[in-house]
Image: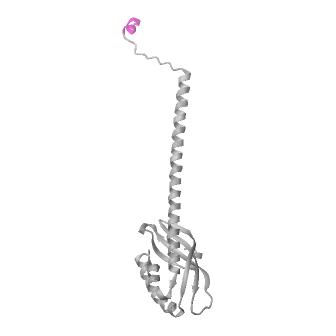
């Protein structure tokens, strides 16, 4: 019986691995895992930083749009109300443009008899909220107003709450005054 076994070729394979080879393989595997985890963390952090930079740029843009609008809307001259009406509706959505045009026409009855003349200098703007690309920005403008009724010009600060929709090419969709800026929407 023993001869039969020897006659058949034995298919035993002997594998010998040194302890050093095992340790090196484990160290290489651990290093690859660490590199993979670090790369994953880096890519995630970079994505968050890119998102924060984009959001910051959008906030700055919204603040710029609101501050420019507020400065233009606050400056008016009773002798050239058409220019003021044009600035008042510039960059606004069609719905808001209609509302503001009607309000400006009504205001003419007050501005002309008072001989209202005001100049405005933008002070500051700050994004109050952002939801789905719609920004509500509080804008503050220094206004110097002269009227026929006052012997001295009146210095004041006008506050505008400006809603801007970035998905509609940064159109202004709503404008409010000091109450809107102070109370949450």
Residue 180 in view: no
The one of 61 and 179 positioned closer to us in this rendering: 61
Report the front residue among 114 and 151.
151
Quadrant the C terminus occupies: bottom right
Residue 23 seen: yes
**Residue range highlighted in magenta:** 1-7
Horizontal relation, residue 75 to residue 93: left or right: right
Q: Which of the two residues, 108 or 148, is positioned nearer the viewer here?
A: 148
* Residue 4 in the image, given as x and y percentages of width and height: 37, 8
Q: From the top left corner, tell me how far across and down residue 89 is, in percent.
A: 44, 79
x and y, in percent, of residue 90 in the image: 44, 76
Query: Up-down: is 112 above or below 30?
Result: below
- Residue 173 vertical placement versus 108 (above, below): above
Image quadrant in which the N terminus is located: top left
Q: Is residue 181 above or below residue 10?
A: below
The residue lying toward the viewer, choosing from 2 and 115, is: 115
Q: Residue at x 39, y 5 (%)?
A: 3
Name the residue at 59% across, 93% down.
149
Q: What residue is shown at x 50% (from left), y 79% (from top)?
A: 73
In the displayed orientation, state which residue is furthest to the top. Answer: 3
Residue 168 placement (x, y as % from top left): 42, 69
Look at the magenta stretch and give its main secondary structure.
Answer: helix
């Amino acid at each position: 019986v023993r001869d039969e076994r020897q006659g058949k070729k034995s298919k035993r394979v002997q594998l010998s691995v040194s302890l050093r080879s095992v340790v090196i393989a484990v160290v290489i595997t651990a290093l690859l895992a660490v590199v993979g985890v670090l790369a994953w963390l880096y890519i995630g952090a970079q994505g968050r930083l890119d998102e924060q930079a984009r959001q910051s740029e959008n906030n700055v843009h919204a603040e710029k749009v609101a501050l420019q609008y507020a400065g233009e809307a606050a400056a008016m001259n009773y002798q050239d109300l058409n220019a003021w009406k044009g600035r008042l509706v510039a960059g606004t959505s069609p719905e808001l443009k209609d509302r503001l045009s009607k309000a400006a026409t009504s205001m003419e009855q007050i501005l002309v008899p008072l001989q209202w003349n005001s100049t405005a200098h933008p002070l500051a703007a700050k994004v109050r909220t952002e939801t789905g690309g719609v920004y509500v920005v509080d804008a503050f403008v220094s206004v110097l107003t002269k009227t026929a009724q006052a012997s001295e010009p009146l210095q004041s600060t006008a506050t505008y709450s400006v809603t801007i929709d970035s998905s509609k090419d940064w159109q202004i969709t709503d404008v409010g005054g000091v109450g809107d800026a102070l109370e949450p929407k």
